[in-house]
Image: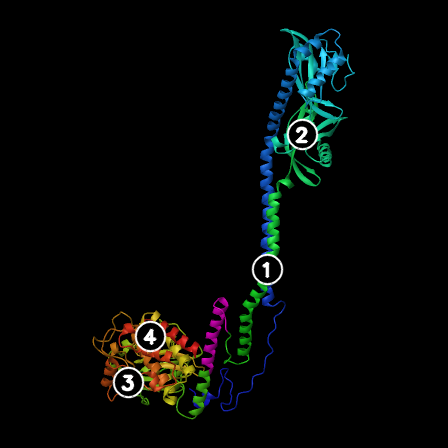
Amino acid sequence: MTNATEAGARNPNGDTVSTSAPAQPLRKRRPTQPVGLSLRYKIFLAVLALLVLIISSMVVLVQWKATRVTRRSVDAAMRNTGRTFSVFLTARFNQVKSDVKQLADDPNLTAAIAETGADHVTVADSLEAKRIEIFSKADYIMAVDSMAMLIARTDDPTKSGTDLSESPLLAIPLEGDQAWGIGSRKGKLSLMASAPVTQGTSTIVGALAMSYPIDSGFAADAKSVTNADATFLVETGNQLAPASSTLTAESGEMLSTALAANPQITAASMGEGKTVGPVEITLGGEPNIVIAVPLTSASGERLGLFVASRSLYQEMSNYRQIRDALIYIGIAAVLLAFAISFFMARRITRPIAALVEVTEQVIEGDLNVEMPAVPNDEVGILARSFAKMLVELRQKAEMEEYLRNLKAQVAGSSTLSQAARISTSSATQPSTSSALAIGGVFNNRYVIEQILGSGAMGTVYKAKDRELDEEVAIKTVKADALKSDPTAVDRFKQEIKLARRITDKHVLRTYDLGEIDGTLYITMEYMKAVTLKYILEQRKALPLGPGLHLAKQICLGLAAAHEQGIVHRDIKPQNMLVSSKGELKLMDFGIARLQGKGGMTQTGLVIGTPDYMSPEQASGLTLDARSDIYSAGVVFYEMFCGLLPYTADTVLAVMLKHIQEPPRPPREANPALPAALEQVILKMLAKQPDARYAKVTEVSEALANVAMKH
C-alpha cells in the first residue's frame, strides 16, 4: 500500500519523479515524409491506370468480338454465294439461249443460210445488222452450214469456210439441240449459246452461235447478286489471269497471285471442278474470305474461275468506327480524368494529410490540437474516430494530471490505495483475535502483507500469492458477523458467483471463495487505487474532462454487468476504484442479483445505500438495469456538481426525496456544466424507469457526444 507521497512520486513506468518539477518542453519532431510517391499521386496514377486499362480492354474486346462476329457472318453468307452465282449464271445463259433461238427462227436469215453457196459477206452483214438492231449486248454472232463449215461471223466478216465440226457448241445444234457454255478468246471470257437453223419443219440447214462478253458490267451484276466482289479469271498458259472484276486491277492481280500461292484451291476447282470455300486468303495484307466456282465450256472444259471475295477489313468498317469512337472517347476521358483525378486525389488526400499533421502534433504531445474540417465520407468517419480517440487521450491526460495534483495536495495523509473494501460504512481496527498476522501465511498460500481496510463485517488484506507469485486482496468475514447475519455466507457466495461471470477491465476481478478454520474469505484482484469517494471528498466537483473520462468507464463496467443480466444494486463512489492512471473499476457485488431472478432479499425489504437508491429500489420494488442507471446518475451528479442531489437528516427522508422530489438542476449547482451534460444527468435521474435511458450504452453514446462538443 502506498501513501499519497509514494503514489505521486512514481510515473506509469514505476520510475521515481518529482511531482512539483515543471514539465520538460517536448522536443519538436520533424514531420514524417512519405517514402516514394505520396498517397495523392498514387491515387492519381491508380485512377489513370485503371481508366486506361478499362478503355484498352474495351477496345480489345470490341475488336475481338467484331472480328469473330464478322467472320461468322461472312462465312455464313459466302456459303450460299456458290448457289446464288449458279442461279445467276443459269439465268444469263437462258437469256443468251433465248436470243440465239430468236435469231435462228428468222425466216430471211434461214433462207440465206440454206442457200447453196451463200455469200458469206451478205450473211455477215445480215447478222451484224441484227446484232446492232436487236442484240446489241452481244459481241459477235457466227453462222455455220449443215456441215459445220463457217459461213460468216460478225467480228471477222471476211472469214469463212473454216471447219468447226469439232466444236461441241456448233456440233450439238446440228443434231437438233441447243448448246451453251463459257467461251474463252484472247484472254477474255464470254457467255456462248447456239441454236439449230431449221428450214421447214425438221430440216436443219445450219446453226447460229452468239457470244455475250463477261465484262465489267457483267461482274458488277454478279457482285450485286452475290453481295461480294466478283472476279472472273481466265486460264492462259496454265495461269489464271483476271478477265473482268469489280476489284481494282491491282487487287485483281493480287487475287490471282494469292490463288497461285494456294494450289489447293485451284486444284480442287480447276482440276476437280468443285466449288471451293469459303476460305481465307490475304490480299494486300488484309484478310479476305473467298469462294471459287469453276467456269466450263459447252464441252465441259474448265476455262477459268469465278471468285467471290469479301474483305474482312471492309466488312468491319462499322465496328472500326465504334472502336475508333471508343478510342477517341477514351483519349478524351483520359485527358478529362487526368484533371479530375488529380483534383479528386487532392481533395481525398487533403483531409488525410491534415489528419497526418494532427497525428504528428499528438505524437509531439499536443493533445489540444484542433481537428480539421472533413467531408462526410470514409475519411470523415476516420477523422471523427480519431477525434474521439483524441478526446479520450485528452481526458485521460487531464485525469492523470488531476490525480497527480490531488496526490501532491494530500501528500502525507492517510491511505491512498486499496483493493477492496467492506460494504459497511463503519470502519474500525480489527481486534487482535480476529486479525490475520502481518507477515504470516494464510491457508498455507497467501503471505499477509498489510491491512487495506476493516469494518463490522470483516477485514481486507493485501497478500502475496506464493503459488502464482502475484499480489491479491483477501476479504475475510468475522465469525461473530456470521452469527449475527445468517445470510452473510450466502451473500459471499452470491458475490463471487456474479462477479466471476463478468470479465471486463472495468470490473474488479474476483478469484475464489474459501473457508479455513472457520474463517470465510474471498480472494480478488489487487489494485493500487483510491475510491472515487475519496477523490470527491478531496476536491468535490471534478473538472469536465476527468469527470467524463470516469463517467464513461462507469458506463462500460455497468454495461459488462448488464450484458450478463446482473443488476449491481449498490452503485456508489465507494464501490469504484480509480488508479493513478485514471483507470476505474467497479467492485463489491455483495448485493447484486440476476435480473428477473429471485434472491436472498425478502419481499418489500430495502437494501442498498440510501443516498444512491433509485425510487423503485427505495420502494422495495423489482429492479432492473435502469435502477443502476439511476444510481449512476446520482454518482454523475455528485462528480460534476460536488454534492448529492438529495440530502436530509434521516435515511428515510433521503429515500422519500428519491421517490418524490425532482432533483435540483445540475447547472444551478455548477453553472459551468454544459447544458447537454445536464440533460444526460436529468434523464438518468427520471423518477419513472421508462423515462430513463433504456440501456447504459445509450448513456455512453450521450456522454461521447458531450465530449466531442466540449
Q: Locate residue 4, reporting x and y percent.
A: 43, 89
Q: Is residue 20 left or right of residue 281?
A: left
Q: Are marks 1 and 3 in contact (CB under 8 Å)?
A: no
Residue span colored magenta? 373-397
> Tag 4, which secondary structure?
helix
Say if 356 sits above or below 409 in the image.
above
Task: Identify the residue shown where x is 47% and y is 80%.
Answer: 394
User: Mark on residue 217?
Assistant: 2
Mark closest to the chain's N terminus, 1 or 2? 2
> Tag 3, which secondary structure?
loop
**Distance (Cα) linking label 2 and label 3:** 116 Å
Q: Locate residue 455, reporting x and y percent.
A: 31, 86
Task: Identify the residue shown where x is 36% and y is 72%.
Answer: 698
User: Mark on residue 646?
Assistant: 3
Note whether residue 484 is visible.
no
User: Mark on residue 216?
Assistant: none
**Distance (Cα) linking label 1 and label 3:** 69 Å
Mark closest to the chain's N terminus, 1 or 4? 1
Note whether residue 269 is visible.
yes
**Distance (Cα) linking label 2 and label 4:** 111 Å
